[in-house]
Structures are given as C-alpha cells and as structure tokens.
Amino acid sequence: MVNTMDKKTTDKKTKKITKQQLKKTLSKKDFLLYEKEQLELKRLQLNSELRKIATKEQQKKRKDETREKILLGSILIQSLKENLLDKDSKTWLSRAIQNFNARDLKFMQNLCNRFNINDDIINDENEIINEGNVED
C-alpha cells in the first residue's frame, strides 16, 4: 500500500514549470528558442492528426464507392435474372462490357451467355488484344 504522504511529496517534485517561471529563468533568446521548438512540435502533431483524418476520409470514400458498386451490380444481376431489361438495355450493357480488360471480358462474356444477353456486339478477346485495349 502506498503511503499518501509519499504520494503528495512525489506530486510536488514532478510539478510542471509554468511558462511564466520558465520565462523568468531563461534568457530571452533561450526562451524564444524554447517557444519555437514547442510550436514546431505542436505543428508536427497537428500535421500528423490531419494526415490520419485524411486517410480515414479516403478509406470511407473507397468503402462507400465499393458498396455502391456492389448494390448496383446486385440490382443489375437481379434484373437480368428476372428478365426485366429490355433489348436496348441489354445492348447498352453488351457495349459497356467491351471496355473491360481481357480477363474480365471473358468473365463478362460468360455472364452475358448466362443471362442470354445479345453478345454478338461484344468483340472477342483476340480482337481486343490486337487493338491494344488490354490492361496488363
């Protein structure tokens, strides 16, 4: 058990020196240097906090964008399953799929086949590679 008397004396020993006391004990030049160092330290801490906040904002934005894509994809797939898209919508989807890279194009072509989307508009994988539209 700690003696309360010892704790009080320890607290007195570790008491912080106030700015006014420091100003009295240091030369003007040293005090200004001390204040400059303190402000620079505070600036570094604030910059660090700003970076953390910016990182969190970016992460939230990416999560939100990913969630939007998932929800929209879900709506589209459900519409395809229930055959709710008209011919123009399916044609638009087929043309949009042309912009995918070769790996994803093959996957999307399988999706088109699965849902009977008119895939005669889609270029085959070899044509896209020859045109140089493939991302490696």
Image (tube, helix red, strand yellow):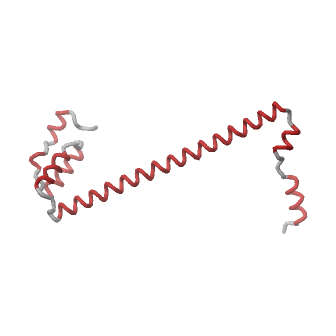
What residue is shown at x 59% (from left), y 47% (from top)? 49
Position of 25 compared to 63: left or right? Answer: right
The image shows residue 120 at horizontal and vertical percentages of 9, 47
Outermost residue to the top: 29
Q: 12 or 20, which is in the foreground?
A: 20
Residue at horizontal 16 percent and vertical 46 percent from the top: 95
64 shown above or below 4 = above
Residue 99 placed where, x, y %?
A: 22, 42
Is residue 65 shown left or right of residue 44?
left
| Figure quadrant of the N terminus | bottom right
The residue lying toward the viewer, choosing from 37 and 14, is: 37
Which residue is found at the position 56% from the left and 45% from the top? 50
Q: Quadrant of the C terminus?
A: top left
In this picture, is 1 found above or below 105?
A: below
Residue 132, placed above or below residue 1: above
Q: Is residue 91 left or right of residue 67?
A: left
Residue 74: x and y, percent?
27, 60
Q: What's the residue at 77%, 36% (across, down)?
A: 34
Q: Count of labels shown? A: 0
Q: Quadrant of residue 6?
A: bottom right
Q: Residue furthest bottom?
A: 1
- Find residue 2 and report its horizontal and vertical position in percent: 85, 66
Depth check, front residue: 20 or 68: 20
